[in-house]
């Protein structure tokens, strides 16, 4: 599996490099079109080689509420025509919708036009896993999961509801299903599931947990009871590790990380073996920041900037995902021996740029040729806001490492932001002041 993954990773990276060369990556500094009338000295002073990566929930909105300062914060990054003059992307662990729909919704709520190319969903990096695109995959989550998977390139998509209807006797946690057997699809013709993709928390946790564990225990074909537990299970790719997120309630709510926690412990209890992810993506995984950096540079080019971004500013409300992930990526960018850095990322995982979470014995982390991975940033700064999961007024455990995914080591330093501010408006004002771009 690791050689297949490596080929996929390198193929994706080569494509990024080709795209970059095609668009003439190495050009001189130039101002956005909206600033073209400014003098040469101003253009040199404000090269805009910095960019923003914003979280959404807990930063701009909280459930149905839009923070009063959200629109004002983004308008500081716009020119007189309402177009972005500072490279900006939105990196969210949400995975229950298409990025085009998410961009449309956020634009309407905040009153600032945001394009889908600026939206990085938790599942966005899945497009690099081309080795699974022609395999039959089960998708779990809410919203248009089939359409999401197909937009990412997956050709043979099965939903949990498809599986439940084929094997109605497997879904028996709900007492209403007992004694009311549905007529299932002919099991003989139902395809064998070759991989499981977890987009986000489902509605009926008991159904999804039961059927996914059945697939893992039977090698993807739950039409018979296995005589022994398989040594390895079919691949599992999970998006969004947030244990909690902030909505309208006074306390954070369960996120997809809680569902993953349940799945991992159920599988361990029933099989005696660890659930081994092929990949964990979404924040705080470095592969998500790598992909987001690529999108940020693409946005920079689209607004007339010729040089690549050298400094990233990541704004979020969750120390265990937003801050941890930004600091982890900063560590990667600063490391002179990046391959050695991989070993310190997690207890059980090798997550640098999407390496399989559990590398098998005999497989070294240096199988990923990082020389072929495109990243231009020199450093990455984390900014924590006080409007979401983290609250300076609460002594609760949220944001103290307790809610981190088990595959990521609990390191206090990685959860400490470079800057702490009250809200996203103060975050933007801070960065513009530091970069000498106030009033630019």
Image (cartoon, rainbow, N blue to C red):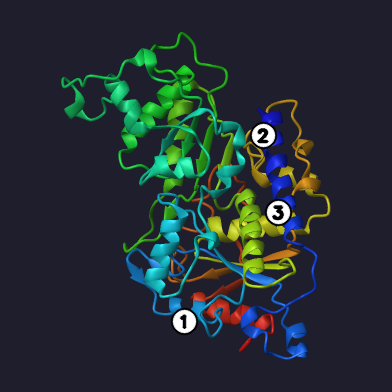
Marks 1 and 2 sit apart, C-alpha to C-alpha, by 43 Å
Marks 1 and 3 sit apart, C-alpha to C-alpha, by 34 Å
Q: Nearer the viewer, residue 143 or 363?
A: 143
Q: What element carries label 2?
A: helix
The disc placed on residue 330 is none
Seen in the picture, residue 237 relative to 30 is either above or below; the reply is above
The disc placed on residue 72 is 1
Residue 396 visible? The answer is: no
Q: Which of 168 and 347 is in front in this view?
A: 168
Using the rendered view, name the quadrant where residue 381 is placed: bottom right
Circle 3 crowding by C-alpha within 10 Å: few under 14, some 14–19, many from 20 = few
Seen in the picture, residue 310 relative to 268 is either above or below; the reply is below
* Mark 3, residue position: 19
Tell me where residue 148 appears, x and y as whole percent: 44, 45
- Work out whether mark 1 precedes mark 2 in sequence or the reverse, and give the earlier one: 2
Give the mark toward the camera: 3 or 2.
Answer: 3
- Work out whether mark 1 precedes mark 3 in sequence or the reverse, and give the earlier one: 3
Q: Nearer the viewer, residue 28 or 183?
A: 28
């Amino acid at each position: 599996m690791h050689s297949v993954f490596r080929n996929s990773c390198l193929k994706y990276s080569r494509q990024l490099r080709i795209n970059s060369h095609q668009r003439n990556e190495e050009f001189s500094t130039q101002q956005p079109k909206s600033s073209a009338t400014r003098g040469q000295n101003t253009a040199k002073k404000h090269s805009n080689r910095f960019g923003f990566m914003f979280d959404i929930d807990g930063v701009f909105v909280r459930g149905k509420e839009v923070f009063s300062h959200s629109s004002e914060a983004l308008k500081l990054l716009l020119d007189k025509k309402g177009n972005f003059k500072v490279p900006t992307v939105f990196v969210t662990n949400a995975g229950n919708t298409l990025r085009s729909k998410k961009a449309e919704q956020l634009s309407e709520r905040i009153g600032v036009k945001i394009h889908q190319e600026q939206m990085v969903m938790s599942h966005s990096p899945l497009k690099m896993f081309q080795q699974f695109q022609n395999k039959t995959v089960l998708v779990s989550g809410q919203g248009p999961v089939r359409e999401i998977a197909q937009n990412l390139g997956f050709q043979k998509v099965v939903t949990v509801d498809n599986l439940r209807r084929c094997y109605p006797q497997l879904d028996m946690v709900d007492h209403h299903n007992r004694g009311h057997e549905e007529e299932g699809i002919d099991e003989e013709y139902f395809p064998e599931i070759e991989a499981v993709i977890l987009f986000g928390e489902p509605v009926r946790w008991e159904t999804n947990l039961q059927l996914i564990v059945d697939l893992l225990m039977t090698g993807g074909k739950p039409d018979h009871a296995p005589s022994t537990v398989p040594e390895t299970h079919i691949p599992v790719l999970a998006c969004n590790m947030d244990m909690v997120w902030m909505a309208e309630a006074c306390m954070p709510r369960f996120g997809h990380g809680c569902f993953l926690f349940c799945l991992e412990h159920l599988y361990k209890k029933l099989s005696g073996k660890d659930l081994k992810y092929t990949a964990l993506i979404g924040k705080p995984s470095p592969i998500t920041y790598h992909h987001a950096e690529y999108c940020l540079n693409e946005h920079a080019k689209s607004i007339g900037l010729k040089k690549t971004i050298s400094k990233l500013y990541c704004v979020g409300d969750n120390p265990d995902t937003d801050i941890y992930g930004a600091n982890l990526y900063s560590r990667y960018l600063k490391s002179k021996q990046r391959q050695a850095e991989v070993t310190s990322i997690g207890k059980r995982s090798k997550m640098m740029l999407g390496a399989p979470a559990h590398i098998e014995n005999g497989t070294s982390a240096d199988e990923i040729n990082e020389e072929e991975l495109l990243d231009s940033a020199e450093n990455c700064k984390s900014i924590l806001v006080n409007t979401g999961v983290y609250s300076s007024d609460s002594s609760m455990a949220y944001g103290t490492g307790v809610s981190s995914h088990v595959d990521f080591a609990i390191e206090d330093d990685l959860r400490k932001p470079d800057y702490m501010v009250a809200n996203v408006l103060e975050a933007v004002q801070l960065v513009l002041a530091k970069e000498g771009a106030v009033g630019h």
